[in-house]
Image: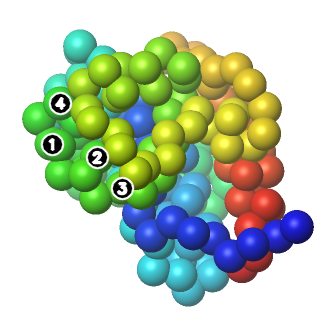
Amino acid sequence: MDTKFPYQSILIVCSVNTARSRMAEGFLRDFFTKLNLSTKVNSGGISSNARDGMTISMDAKLVMKEVGIKLSDSTYSTDLKKHHEFVKKADLILTLTNKHKEEIMDFFNIDNKDILTIKEFAGESGDIEDPSMKEELFRKVRDEIINNLMKGLNKYEF
């Protein structure tokens, strides 16, 4: 049974916030904008090598552009360990892997927030792996992210 989408603010989490989480954020922002919904979407990195100010992967930008979604040239990575406000504001946290989910739960108090991997959001299990600088893998990961997000979103009435 479909139900109204209950979330006002979504946070996408991956390792360093330069590829997977940025693709997922770009897709969701585009999705909500096209439906004229005010759901906020942000992303960040949680791993030990996450840094503020890293540029977004050119491969991520290219493969998202192929599906009509432009990732901003003026956007830089966010280290969530330094920006707790992103976690505090989110009422849904979607991670790319179970490891990211564990890292968020270890670092932050996640009371009253839903935290799922993108695969769990889709009703599945497993991780969406890092494409590691290979353009063909970026396309595979982009499609996996979009397909899983759509599966999860299709549970709701828009």
Image vertical order of residue 128 relative to residue 63, above or below: above
* Residues at circles 2 and 1 in contact by the CB criterion of under 8 Å: no
Disc 1, SS = loop
Q: Position of residue 24 (x, y in %)?
A: 54, 46
10 Å crowding of disc 3: few (<14), some (14-19), many (20+): many
Measured from the top left, where is residue 92 in percent x and y? Answer: 47, 52
25 horizontally vs 83: left or right: right
Callout in the foreground (2, 1): 2
Q: Amino acid at mark 1?
A: His
Horizontal and vertical percent position of residue 134:
57, 17
Looking at the rendered structure, the secondary structure element under dot 2 is helix
According to the picture, the residue beneath numbered tag 4 turns out to be 81
Which quarter of the image is occupied by the C terminus? bottom right
The circle drawn on residue 83 is 1
- Identify the residue at horizontal 40%, vertical 51% (top origin): 112
Q: Secondary structure at mark 3?
A: loop
Q: Which amino acid type corresponds to the residue marked 2 in the rendered image? A: Val
Marks 4 and 1, Cα distance to the nearest angstrom? 6 Å
Which residue is disc 3 drawn over?
90
Label drawn at residue 87: 2
Q: Earlier in the sequence, mark 4 or mark 3?
A: 4
Q: Are marks 4 and 2 in contact (CB under 8 Å)?
A: no
Question: Furthest residue to the front?
Answer: 111
In screen coordinates, is 48 left or right of 24? Answer: left
Q: What residue sits 41% from the left and 63% below the top?
A: 9
Residue found at x 45% / y 70%:
8
Task: Identify the amino acid type marked 4.
Answer: Lys
